Amino acid sequence: MSALREAMRELPDAVFADLLESDDAYLLVIDLPGANEKTVDVGVSDGKLEIEARREKDVPMDFSYLQEERSLFLDADLPLPPDATGADAEATIDRGVLELRLPKREATPEQEIHVESR
């Protein structure tokens, strides 16, 4: 089993993620409700995919929390598969669903991945 799939199992229960593979890339799909391209940072460093996301929660004025379990932040470091690279990686976010396309190639240096809205 790949280290990335194993690390995905360690994500908080509230984070839903899928990992897909084609002949030339991996596709990581993560649900981040309330997040957008301005509140998500993604990068590749030292063989790891680094994801930082934050979201806002609106609480109606007449209500207060009895229980709060939806985190405002997600910080995840996931190991890249050995044949994946951050070079030419693409990231999009649409209604809180982040899609990261990681090409398969030789390892490349540290790189930030720009997140765009659809």
Image (tube, helix red, strand yellow):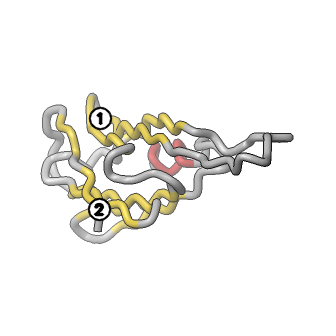
**Horizontal side of residue 42 vs 30, given as left or right:** left
Location of residue 51 (image quadrant): top left
**Coordinates of residue 31 in the picture (x, y in percent):** 51, 58
Up-down: is 75 above or below 90?
above
- The answer, for residue 101, to whether it is visible in the render is no
The foreground one among 25 and 96 is: 96
The residue carrying pointer 2 sits among few (fewer than 14), some (14 to 19) or many (20 or more) residues within 10 Å by Cα, namely: few
**Horizontal side of residue 80 vs 29, given as left or right:** left
**Residue drawn at (80%, 40%) of the image:** 65
As helix, strand or loop, the secondary structure at mark 2 comes to strand
As helix, strand or loop, the secondary structure at mark 1 comes to loop
Give the mark toward the camera: 1 or 2.
2
**Residue drawn at (17%, 37%) of the image:** 111
**Coordinates of residue 114 in the picture (x, y in percent):** 21, 48
The residue carrying pointer 1 sits among few (fewer than 14), some (14 to 19) or many (20 or more) residues within 10 Å by Cα, namely: some
The disc placed on residue 47 is: 1
The foreground one among 18 and 74 is: 74
Question: Disc 1 residue type?
Answer: Gly
The reply to whether the C-beta atoms of the residues labelled 1 and 2 are less than 8 Å apart is no
Q: CA distance from mark 1 to mark 2?
A: 26 Å
Question: Disc 2 residue type?
Answer: Ser
Up-down: is 24 above or below 105?
below
Q: In the rendered structure, which disc, 1 or 2, sits on the residue that comes first in sequence?
A: 1
- The answer, for residue 98, to whether it is visible in the render is yes
Looking at this rendering, what residue extends furthest in the front direction? 62
Q: Which residue is mark 2?
A: 117
The foreground one among 28 and 80 is: 28
The foreground one among 47 and 36 is: 36
The disc placed on residue 15 is: none
